[in-house]
Image: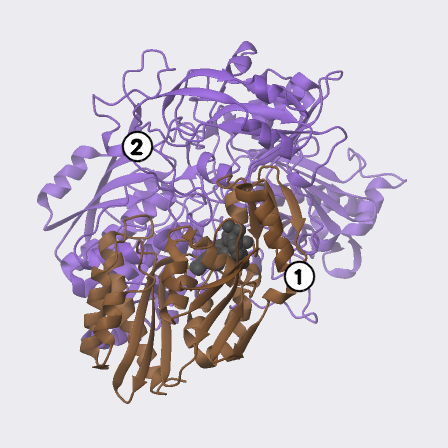
Amino acid sequence: MQVPAPFEYERATSVEQAIALRAKLGDEARFIAGGHSLLPMMKLRLANPEHLIDINDLEELFYIKEEAGEIRIGAMSRHRDLLDSELLYQHFPIFRDAEKLIADPVVRNRGTIGGSLCQADPAEDLSAVCATLGATCVIKSETGERVVDMKEFHVGPYETAVGDAEMLTEIRIPTASNGGSAYEKVERRAGDWAVVSSGASVWMDGDTITAGRVGLAAVGDNTTQLDGVAELLAGKTASEELYTQAGELAAASCSPQTDNRGTEAYKRHLAMELTRRSLRRAVARAQGQEA
Amino acid sequence: MTTTEPAPTEERPIGFGKLLRKEDPRLIRGMGNFVDDIQLKGMLHLAILRSPMAHAKIVSIDKSAAEAMEGVVAVVTGEDLAGHGLAWMPTLSNDVQAVLATDKVRFQHQEVAFVVATDRYIARDALEQIDVEYEWIDPVVDVRTAMNPDVPVIRTDLEGKTDNHVFDWETGDAAATQAVFDNADVVVKQEVIYPRSHPAPMETCGCVADLNRVSGQLNLWSTTQAPHAHRTVYALVAGLPEHKIRVIAPDIGGGFGNKVPIYPGYVCAIVASLLIGKPVKWMEDRTENLVTTGFARDYVMQGEIAATKEGKILAIRTDVLADHGAFNGVAAPVKYPAGFFGVFTGSYDIEAAYCSMKAVYTNKAPGGVAYACSFRITEAVYLVERMVDVLALELDMDSAELRLKNLIKEDQFPYETKTGWVYDSGNYEPALRKAMEMAGYDELRREQAEKRERGELMGIGLSFFTEAVGAGPRKDMDILGLGMADGCELRIHPTGKAVVRLSVKTQGQGHETTFAQIVAEEIGIPPEDIEVVHGDTDNTPFGLGTYGSRSTPVSGAAAALVTRKVRDKAQIIASGMLEVSVADLEWNKGSFSVKGDPSKSVTIQDIAMKAHGAGDLPEGIEGGLEAQICYNPENLTYPFGAYICVVDVDPGTAEVKVRRFIAVDDCGTQINPMIIEGQVHGGLADGVGMALMQMISFDEDGNCLSGSLMEYLIPTALETPDWETGHTVTPSPHHPIGAKGVGESATVGSPPAVVNAVVDALRPYGVKHADMPLTPSRVWEAMQGNHTPPI
Ligand SMILES: Cc1cc2nc3c(=O)[nH]c(=O)nc-3n(C[C@H](O)[C@H](O)[C@H](O)COP(=O)(O)OP(=O)(O)OC[C@H]3O[C@@H](n4cnc5c(N)ncnc54)[C@H](O)[C@@H]3O)c2cc1C
């Protein structure tokens, strides 16, 4: 049995109280959401927080709803909720694609979108999903709240815009018609983290992609949203050649590293192949060609 | 799945046949009793401090801060152990291994010190307070460089050691083999690597040691596959009198060979209990299990086959470089340093064979024989079955046809191989034909041809294996001088219920059911009336334990023979009861009757009561109905099988999907077909795991990169197909019930089938070979012509 170092534990009763506590305890404290990133690190003693503030009782953070032309997702929504949500699936099938391949049911029953985005693991999937969809994040502190886009939110591996005395409370995704989205991932085994993943979203006018985005996971820094690919796609007619071009650009825009999951060359190849596939499927969905 | 439970209406067999496992109700209901469930009064907890480096001199250890912690009872270093003469212990291969490092550490995570505390959390926290100063030494990580003159010597503890050599070994006839190669039409060569893997049982290793200072009695609850062998080794290591040692293996959560060796942790717990006078528990965590305990494989094999252009295999030759880690911890019979690798000639009738091997030390965890390998037969079968496919490709011949052409024929058994193994019985061709029929082989090849036209990648892989299990005959097999014969004891109680006591120990194989069925078959008492006692040295006869698929071949034979011995006595008692001569009695599974007059009969239960009751027994017969024997196997048993794997490879991502897997096994007489099928299912899953994802890997500093199940991947239901199993039955001629072992057949036989299927799928890319694990990246690199060995 692997056991963490000793720590103090408190269950938060409201978002305000949780933030106040975090502000008071400072750097040595951590929120604990699903615990599926934090607890393994604590057990391996890679993380040794002195205080855990448990935010699992904060009912106000569990929701997926449509409001003001946006889908709004409470930070404590579990992977499982995202997987099951019909509302989310209707608007953004990319979530279901991704969630089907995130970890396993045990992890999905507890792990949260807030925890995933805040952990910002380089192989984590939801940052790319959210970035692809043009999501914004609501970050609360004792003094108020701010809304940042994914680019600002996701600073780099294990680094986000959320400060020591702040909490991510909500993810907002603008809805628009004629959109389609999809996610593709290669893993060595079910439940493993991505070797490479690629998410794509497009908005179409007939055969023309009016706007499109591609984001990658597990291939280095700053890939959750590839600006070059978005520029390439804008205003183009959907075609296999375009997907290949986008794939090649995606492969050139990332910086994967050789490790046990795969060689750099293979990962670059996947960035290209999976981008082609996710774009192809996103377009098909936008055109109502895939149920 | 093809397994179906026997319908409730179906008769429960009194003897062989499908029967639900007797042990399952308690395990399924969470009523099992595992080592970590053991709680003793005043029990303390032990945690081990491990080296962060693979090779380093220990400069100093400061344990004062840890000792000062509340709840810490003792902190012990190698130096402390050396004071008691306990810093080193023998391995099962007559090498020595450090219990706690004294001079230097030789692999990452090696044991450096231990803490004993009032609870496991304090013990763990105290490890952080021990300050060890290390001085880096360059590690030897790449096995191929281990014998270079300029690399550091790892085993400086061994007097006069100037290199990293462990042993050289050879088998077969070098000159005769060379002559065949010189004159052959066709010679194929290929380097074939079996990377390091780990059995990764669900339950990690651990023990509770309770040494009573007054009586001198040591009770040790431990995760061991071989309680009796362990008891003797403890007696030898610790100098404890053997009659004062009781080793108890309660329920064991999987072993696969991982629980054969004696690990430093066990010795630490015993020493701690001795020093402190209280019971001490040690349980590994998952990482400790993966990175320090018995690994498996790690063979770099140069394979060669000589053949005629018509595809007759003439000779097989191999040169092997074996990575044994920092200590030679191989658990194999002493005269077999490479285990039973000598069966690398496989299932084929050839003219000559030769193997040379060099084993070396590296800065990696010790071990070597583990993971359901039947003493290195996994490596041997993988080599030959991979090489046969290399030959098939060279000859552009169908791989099934090539095998059919070369399989040993039925009338050649018993067959002596060119490396001196005598295969007891076999009928190979029908097994392969059956597998081909189940698979629809010709249809699959047609489908494959069509798919290739369309650029789709489908592969069909075969493997035909012969196992050698049931170690072993006393004449040439022993471990640390202990012969490999097994005792067995059977007692029939007055009411006709029975207790059979075994020296072997289940780790999930279903001994409590299988052995009850063996006894039932011989004496006609229903299996539910037969209690199987095992895993406790005080309550069972001596024997060497469960590994290498030896339980049924050795202890199973013992159980059958001890039952026959009891039955012989029962017959004499029955002759008295029925007042006829012994020769006039007829046995009808459960009762004796007078020949020609079936109405005159006594059941075994009647006889049992008589044996314990009042009144006279036939002359010279003592009361009671029990017997004990020790069975010395005449030979190993040689189960075999034919496996076919069908894979689809995504040409874009190089992901491999195992679509179908057909397994035809022949393990001789089947005792419980359902248990056999379960063993096969497990082994097939293991094989898919090894072929596609499992590997213990290291970086160049010797850091183990596979310290969690996030990195050391084990297949799930999603990676494994519905197994299609079948069987043929070719009894062993020398085993009393004709049974052979089956526990490891599928682990041995399946990896080559999967790899052969993947390589077959990649044929359009000109791929001749690719080493395991065939992860998407490694497959893709092979498709690009960039395949690199995993080590
Ligand atoms: C076996 C396994 C496989 C996995 N596979 C994948 C995979 O394939 N893809 C993938 O994307 N993920 C994977 N994960 C990660 C999983 O999705 C985690 O659940 C997720 O990364 C973290 O979410 P959590 O709710 O568990 O966060 P926690 O572990 O509770 O927290 C993570 C970090 O975020 C902080 N935090 C949490 N919530 C907030 C908040 N609202 N505001 C500010 N800070 C917060 C915590 O303080 C902590 O530092 C896997 C995990 C496991 C154990």
Q: Which residue, given by chain and number where applicable, does mark 2 sit on? A: B141
Label 1 sits on residue: B13
Q: Nearer the viewer, residue B361 or B409?
A: B361
- Residue B590 seen: no
Q: Name the secondary structure under disc 1.
A: loop
* Label 2: which secondary element: loop
- Do callouts 2 and 1 point to residues on the same chain? yes
Chain bearing mark 2:
B
- Of the residues under marks 2 and 1, which one precedes in the sequence? 1
Dividing the picture into quadrants, the one containing residue A176 is: bottom left
Is B319 above or below relative to B130? below
B158 vs A127, nearest the viewer: A127
Q: Quadrant of residue A56?
A: bottom right
Residue shown at 51% from the left, 13% from the top: B79
Q: Is residue B79 above or below residue B651?
A: above
Please state if B286 lies on the left or on the right of B332 as rendered: right
Q: Which chain is brown?
A: A
* Amino acid at pointer 1: Pro
Measuring 33% from the left and 48% from the top, which residue is drawn there? Answer: A260
Measuring from the top left, give residue A77's x and y in whole percent: 55, 66
Q: Percent from the top left, x then y, of residue B126? A: 59, 27
Q: Extreme bottom residue here?
A: A206
Most foreground residue, B184 or A58: A58
Q: Which chain is purple?
A: B
- Within 10 Å of disc 1 (Cα), the crowding (few <14, some 14-19, many 20+) is some
Residue type, numbered disc 2: Val
- Locate residue B42: give its quadrant: top right
- Look at the image and tell me in which quarter the C terminus of chain B lies: top left
| C-alpha span from label 2 to label 1 | 54 Å
Residue found 81% across the figure and 36% down from its top: B623
- For the question of whether residue B342 can be seen, the reply is yes
Count neighbours of disc 2 (C-alpha within 10 A) and say few if under 14, some if 14 to 19, many if 20 or more: many
